[in-house]
Image (cartoon, helix red, strand yellow):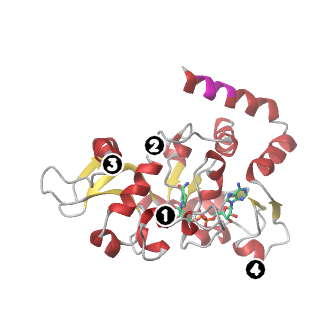
């Protein structure tokens, strides 16, 4: 399970980190209060702040970091049952196939007309978003909203895979999330009690703080440092360095 914290080393601010988080830097988005950016009522009143964020987070602006490559390595080794992410930056897609990924809070990769409900690939309105234009449906002129889950909206069907996945997991790794947003946060309680839960985060969060289990493990501090320690303990340091090198070369080519 991962959250915004795995992408802060890539330069994408999280929500709640004091000072650097999105919620403490609202002026540029012109919002009455932080959560309004993901509220439908506010979106229909003024979609511009959301599209300013969309422009920022659009695929291609940021690169995955060591935490993403660690998840990729888990997958390459056949150890990843599923990756549940709250992130909407799409960085997990670099190397993790769609079948292994649950983007619980949606994605910019597709979009839906808010009036006629037609679906569009995200790429189709990239030009509009980059030019600070609110994208409109070519058929009915309704506003097109990227398939990001707003407060009160239903989570994607794939989220419910957790009912089969969590009882099967042998290990639950949780990285870079405040575990404050439901229902995602409660997944941290859905693994079997005999299964260790590993938290890599700046501070204790969710059940690690208020109802820890005897077999919980918390590596507190910077995420990259925490991932490096785990990778070292697994004896995968060289492998991950090779992977990062290969992927960086791909970017350069
Ligand atoms: P959050 O509530 O902002 O929590 C982030 C957590 O990560 C906090 O506990 C931080 O202390 C911790 N953290 C951040 N950076 C580091 C670091 N470098 N080292 C160690 N710990 C760190 O974010 P959540 O994901 O828990 O909240 C859920 C929201 C945030 C979801 O709905 C997301 O869509 C949304 N969000 C996503 C992105 C993204 O896609 N990258 C960015 C901002 C917000």
Q: Position of residue 8 (x, y in %)?
A: 63, 52
Dot 3: within a 10 Å radius of its alpha carbon, few (fewer than 14), some, or many (20 or more) residues?
Answer: many
Residue pointed to by mark 4: 210
Q: Residue at x 67, y 71 (%)?
A: 189
Residue pointed to by mark 2: 59
- Spatial CA distance of label 1 from label 3 is 31 Å
Residue 54 is left or right of residue 43, and the answer is: right
Query: Foreground: 73 or 149?
Result: 149
Q: Which of the numbered marks, if any, corresponds to residue 129? A: 3
- The quadrant in which the C terminus is found is top right
Callout 2 secondary element: loop
Q: Position of residue 104 (x, y in %)?
A: 49, 60
- Nearer the observer, disc 2 or disc 3? 3
- Spatial CA distance of label 1 from label 4 is 25 Å
- Spatial CA distance of label 3 from label 4 is 42 Å
Quarter location, residue 219? bottom right
Dot 1: within a 10 Å radius of its alpha carbon, few (fewer than 14), some, or many (20 or more) residues?
Answer: few
Q: Position of residue 115 (x, y in %)?
A: 19, 64
**Is residue 18 covered in magenta?**
no
- Nearer the observer, disc 1 or disc 3? 3
Q: Magenta span covers which residues? A: 245-249
């Amino acid at each position: 399970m991962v959250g915004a914290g795995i992408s802060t080393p890539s330069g994408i601010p999280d929500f709640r980190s004091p000072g650097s988080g999105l919620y403490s830097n609202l002026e540029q988005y012109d919002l009455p209060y932080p959560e309004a950016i993901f509220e439908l009522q506010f979106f229909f009143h003024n979609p511009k702040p959301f599209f300013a964020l969309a422009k920022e987070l659009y695929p291609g602006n940021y690169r995955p970091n060591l935490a993403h490559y660690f998840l990729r390595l888990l997958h390459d080794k056949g150890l990843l049952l599923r990756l549940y992410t709250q992130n909407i930056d799409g960085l997990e897609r670099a190397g993790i196939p769609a079948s292994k990924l649950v983007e619980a809070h949606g994605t910019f990769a597709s979009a839906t007309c808010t009036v006629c409900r037609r679906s569009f690939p995200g790429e189709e309105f990239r030009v509009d978003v980059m030019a600070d234009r609110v994208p409109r449906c070519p058929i009915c002129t309704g506003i097109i909203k990227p398939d990001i889950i707003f407060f009160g909206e239903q989570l994607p069907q794939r989220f419910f895979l957790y009912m089969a996945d969590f009882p099967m997991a042998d290990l639950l790794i949780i990285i870079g999330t405040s575990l404050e947003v439901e229902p995602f946060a409660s997944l941290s309680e859905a693994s079997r009690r005999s299964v260790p839960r590993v938290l890599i985060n700046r501070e204790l969060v969710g059940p690690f703080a208020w109802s820890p289990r005897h077999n919980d493990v918390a590596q507190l501090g910077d995420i990259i440092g925490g991932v490096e320690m785990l990778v070292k303990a697994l004896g995968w340091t060289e492998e991950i360095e090779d992977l990062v090198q290969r992927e960086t070369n791909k970017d350069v080519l």
